């Protein structure tokens, strides 16, 4: 398959980047995956401006990645916290792969966080595995082929 013979806009990487968008969106998702769900807590932990955080959370809700759930502390006005939807939870491997990359290439051998499997305490990592169960350890083992949604370029 010649990749440049197909419309890149139909690519799922492009569609996913359309949701993840930018640095702040990915970091907001990291916070929510790590249990920080309230606007003020996310803002404080990230140091992001109120307007940027409002926009990113609204977009993630609109995209179906997050849902807003009301809560109210005694004596306070009603507020919302943000929870992952099924679509949002499916982004976990994407963030784990990004973390693995950063740990391997950018952390100087000193990762800030380890992800542990609750059942056995083994470390959790993103891995490529084919449908037959074979581990893919090099990009050279991967071939590209058009899928059912591929759209050849016109002309």
Image (spheres, rainbow, N blue to C red):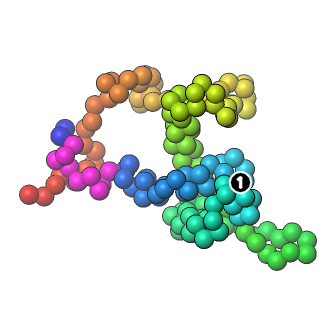
Left or right, 7 with reference to 120: left
Q: Is residue 49 or residue 97 the one in the foreground? A: 49
Is 4 in the magenta? Answer: yes
Find residue 125 and report its image quarter: top right
Left or right, 89 with reference to 131: right
Left or right, 12 with reference to 147: right
Mark 1 lies on residue = 45
Q: Residue furthest right?
A: 74
Please say whether residue 87 is visible from this viewpoint: no
Check the picture and name the quadrant holding the N terminus. Answer: top left
Please say whether residue 19 is visible from this viewpoint: yes
Picture coordinates of residue 62, whole percent (x, y): 53, 68
Residue name at image x 63 percent, y 65 percent: 49
Picture coordinates of residue 26, whole percent (x, y): 55, 52
Residue name at image x 35 percent, y 27 percent: 139
Find residue 65 and report its image quarter: bottom right
Picture coordinates of residue 61, whole percent (x, y): 57, 66
Residue name at image x 27 percent, y 36 percent: 144
Q: Is residue 50 or residue 122 the one in the foreground? A: 50
* Mark 1 secondary-structure assignment: helix
Q: Which residues are magenta?
A: 3-11
Picture coordinates of residue 22, whole percent (x, y): 48, 56
Find residue 41 and report its image quarter: bottom right
């Amino acid at each position: 398959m010649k990749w440049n013979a197909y419309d890149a806009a139909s690519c799922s990487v492009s569609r996913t980047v359309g949701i993840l968008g930018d640095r702040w969106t990915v970091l907001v998702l990291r916070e929510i995956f790590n249990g920080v769900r309230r606007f003020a807590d996310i803002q404080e932990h990230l140091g992001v401006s109120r307007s940027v955080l409002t926009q990113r959370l609204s977009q993630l809700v609109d995209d179906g990645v997050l849902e807003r759930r009301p809560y109210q502390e005694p004596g306070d006005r009603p507020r919302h916290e943000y929870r992952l939807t099924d679509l949002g939870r499916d982004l976990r491997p994407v963030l784990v792969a990004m973390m693995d990359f950063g740990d391997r290439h950018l952390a100087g051998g000193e990762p800030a966080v380890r992800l542990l499997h609750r059942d056995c305490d083994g470390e959790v990592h993103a891995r490529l595995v084919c449908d037959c169960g074979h581990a893919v350890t090099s990009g050279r083992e991967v071939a590209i082929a058009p899928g059912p949604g591929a759209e050849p370029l016109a002309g």
